[in-house]
Image (cartoon, helix red, strand yellow):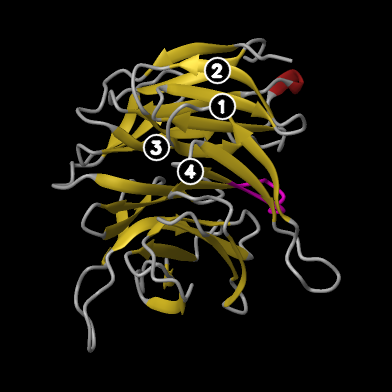
Amino acid sequence: MSLAFLHAHDCAEAHSDAVWGVAWTQTDSTISISADGAIKQWDSASGQVSRALPAHPHALVSLDVDLAGTRVLYNSLEGLTSLWDLQSGEIIGKHESYVRSGAGPGEPAWSVALDPKGNTYATTGGAGNVTLHSAQATSFGERLATLASGRNKFGMFCKYSPDGKRVAMSSENGQISIWDVASESLQVVYTSHAMAVRSLAWSPDSQQLLSASEDKRMILHDVRVSASGKPGSGAVATLAGHSSWVLSADISPDGRYALSGSADKTIKVWDLSTRTAVSTIQDTGEVWSVSWRPRPAPNNTAGAFVSGGEDGVVRWWRAAGAG
């Protein structure tokens, strides 16, 4: 089986540097962050900017949105984490993660992830741990817990599961750690990759985790806990076909398809039931971020997604037959 994806439109005004993160929200807007320091909100139907904040002096490197699509968490290169309320248009929280506190220096955040309900957020960085913080406006950035991986390898990416019960973190050496949030306990460590894992994506039911790595592969993991209390079966599928680093990944809202963006300048759509690539789209440069439209696709089609990459352009794509 193969799928045809059509180029719907580009953004009206490109970023002046690479787009390092995109997110298509439940409210049908798209958020993008860039190496130019800018964060923009777009109308996904037209590609027009609906709102933009003044550019930060440093690149913006990490992005996440809550389940409702009303709050945006983003992080800068030096570790300034901000929370943007899309309803009011205001920044309602800022935390300088690099500031020295207590007896030691701060731990600069690199990747940030927002709890689906928007109450807390997670960060990872140089120490290879995950730190949980308050996402409440009155106590934003307050440290709630440190989840130790015990491995001291740079944390590349972190992500809450859609049900908010787990948080996953990937490292520069290819390891993936998953914690139970309520008990703050490390559940499992996967050593599926031999090189850095750049991106993680959860299935909508929170039972599977997809990892995208510099080893040119994506691996699908079963994270369910068995009756004996042991973690799931780990790697259940390998998706191979890119000729360079896989930089970004996502899973469709119906759980049928995976999406990948690569340094080989292509985007691939994968059928998770057959473990095969069913569509390959040639882009103009490295594809740093991809995001499915979170709403169910019409007429059982594959839906639509947005991408961002090296050329600074945000692009929207739709499956043939999708409105």
- Name the residue that disc number 1 marks: 241
- Disc 3/disc 1 C-alpha distance (Å): 28 Å
- Name the residue that disc number 4 marks: 213
- Name the residue that disc number 3 marks: 31
Q: Residue flagged by tag 4: what amino acid is it?
A: Ser
Residue count near mark 2 (Cα–Cα under 10 Å), binned few <14, some 14–19, many ≥20: some
Residue 23 visible somewhere in the drawing? no
- In what element is the residue under mark 2? strand
Residue 280 visible somewhere in the drawing? yes
Q: Position of residue 204 (x, y in %)?
A: 68, 46
Q: What is the residue that sits farthest to the left in this orientation?
A: 57
Asked whether 88 or 299 is in front, the reply is 299
Judge whether 26 appears above or below 303 on screen: below
- Disc 2/disc 3 C-alpha distance (Å): 24 Å
Nearest to the eye among marks 2 and 3: give it.
Answer: 2
Nearest to the eye among marks 2 and 4: give it.
Answer: 4
- Kindly identify the residue that appears in the image at 54 percent across and 60 percent down: 168
Q: Residue flagged by tag 2: what amino acid is it?
A: Thr
- In what element is the residue under mark 3? strand
- Kindly identify the residue that appears in the image at 40 percent across and 22 percent down: 265
Nearest to the eye among marks 4 and 3: give it.
Answer: 4
Write the start and end of the magenta stretch as one range: 202-210
On residue 280, which mark appears? 2
- In what element is the residue under mark 1? loop
